[in-house]
Image (spheres, helix red, strand yellow):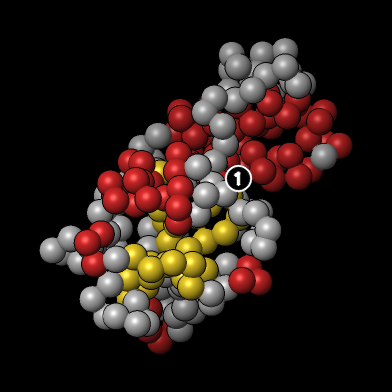
Amino acid sequence: MEATRLIDSAPIRIGQRFRCKGKYPYEDVVDFMVIQSLKDASSYQLLVVSGFMAGRVLCDIPKEAVNDWGAIDRAWMIEHWSTIYPDCPVEDVWVMGFDLPEFPVSDEQTGGRRIHVSPDLSSALHTFSYWIANGTVGMPLLEGIDYLSVCREEPSLLQTTYAIFVNNLEIDENGSVLNYGYAEQRAAQYLRQYCDEDYIAEPPFRYFEVELY
């Protein structure tokens, strides 16, 4: 799932979501979607689309916030965010991409073909698994850290470590992995932070990095 900080994002369009830290009456994380206003088709609204409050309109986005191409100006959102949703600082707000659900595709539609991961992505997963298994992933950051013993006692640690690695991978249109080293480093930082109470990963882990899809 593609995500960009609001402070770094392009103009925001209908259908995109803001992901924020939640607070009562919301859950720990809350999503707001940009929709066409139910009152005025020339303006927009933010709709709650997660948790028990889903379906509630959070606020109206006035016409002056919308540019000539129908997108919400980022600068306007940043300036007004503290009044839109004050429980999450603007620096911690994420703008999510246009991720769509995938429907099952029958053999008749694909001619019996199956879609496989690219050789480069497969190689990245194999390599990461090898370094994890022999205790040398993310060196020198994890030098002297016996993370394998901890993983044996707490399998969920290994699950989240893999999630961080995969969620950080960037793949181009040809299936080539663009940032293996960075993804491995983030996974290693998580292991180090979990096993060493004096270590704090920088930057802090973001929501999309630790999600278990």
What residue is shown at x 60% (from left), y 45% (from top)? 210
What residue is shown at x 49% (from left), y 79% (from top)? 104
Asked if 63 appears above or below 103 in the picture, the reply is above
What residue is shown at x 35% (from left), y 46% (from top)? 78
Q: Which residue lies furthest to the bottom in this view?
A: 108
Q: Residue furthest front?
A: 83
Q: Which structural element holds mark 1?
A: helix
For this view, does 208 lie left or right of residue 70?
A: right
Asked if 138 appears above or below 41 in the picture, the reply is above
Q: Which residue lies furthest to the right in this view?
A: 153
Along the viewing direction, whichever of 44 and 15 lies nearer the viewer = 44
Q: Which amino acid does label 1 sit on?
A: Val
Tell me where residue 11 appears, x and y as whole percent: 26, 54
Q: Can residue 30 be seen in this view?
A: yes
Along the viewing direction, whichever of 209 and 184 lies nearer the viewer = 209
Q: Name the residue under label 1.
A: 210
Quadrant position of the C terminus in the picture: bottom right
Q: Is residue 171 visible?
A: no
Quadrant position of the N terminus in the picture: bottom left
Tell me where residue 74 appears, x and y as whole percent: 29, 50
